[in-house]
Image (cartoon, rainbow, N blue to C red):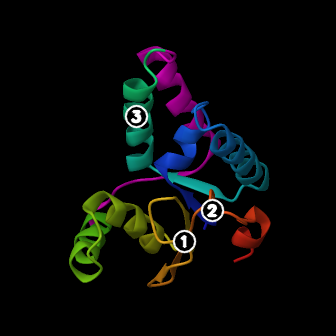
Amino acid sequence: MSGVALIDTNVLVYTIDTDEEEKCHSAQALLRILEIKEVGALCAQVLGEHHSVVARRFGHTHGRGEATAATERWAHAFPVYDTTLRVVLEALRATIRYQMPYYDAQIWAVARVNHIPLVLSEDFTDGAVIEGVRFANPFAEGFDPEAALAV
């Protein structure tokens, strides 16, 4: 396993969201830790979503070229896992068994299939564990990156 924490789109997006100053600083600090310790990972879906959100929500300050460059920087900063057929089938199973929205299920499936024990996201129930994959909200009060990464 090359990463211990799969990073969701919202963590990447908050690094440039100056309207959410506290989350912006928290996301930047967390990603620095993950990069330095070499314990972060991304999936292809997250990179696509990142570009889409940055271009759409921050287009006034980040043009398409800048959004693309930012997404490419993240792609080179962390290992990136592909959306394979096995991931798609696991995600479909999770939509039925756990009633997850498909794209959330796909992130969970990438983590499960690739034996990544932690997903960092504000979109899941903080502290939940589904089939060995734990979810942590890095923006929750009291979140401790060192403790979360001690898996």
Q: Secondary structure at mark 2?
A: loop
Residue at 79% in and 49% down = 36
The type of residue carrying mark 3 is: Val
Q: Check contact, mark 2 vs mark 1: CB within 8 A.
A: yes
In the rendered image, residue 31 lying in the magenta stretch gets the answer no
Residue 116 higher or lower than 67, as above or below: below
Q: Residue at x 51, y 59 (%)?
A: 122
- Could you tell me which residue is drawn at 56 percent across and 48 percent down? 11
- Report, in whole angstroms, how far the alpha carbon at label 2 lies from the one at label 1: 8 Å
What residue is pinned by disc 1?
A: 126
The percent position of residue 100, horizontal first and vertical second, equals: 29, 70
Give the magenta-colored segment's residue range. Answer: 61-85
* Distance from Cα at disc 1 to Cα at disc 3: 23 Å
Q: Which residue is mark 3?
A: 53
Residue 140 is marked as 2
3D distance between C-alphas at marks 2 and 3: 22 Å
Task: Give, as a three-letter code, the residue at label 1.
Answer: Asp
Labels 1 and 3 touching (C-beta < 8 A): no
Residue 142 location (% of width, % of height): 73, 66
Q: Earlier in the sequence, mark 2 or mark 1?
A: 1
Identify the image quadrant of the N terminus. bottom right
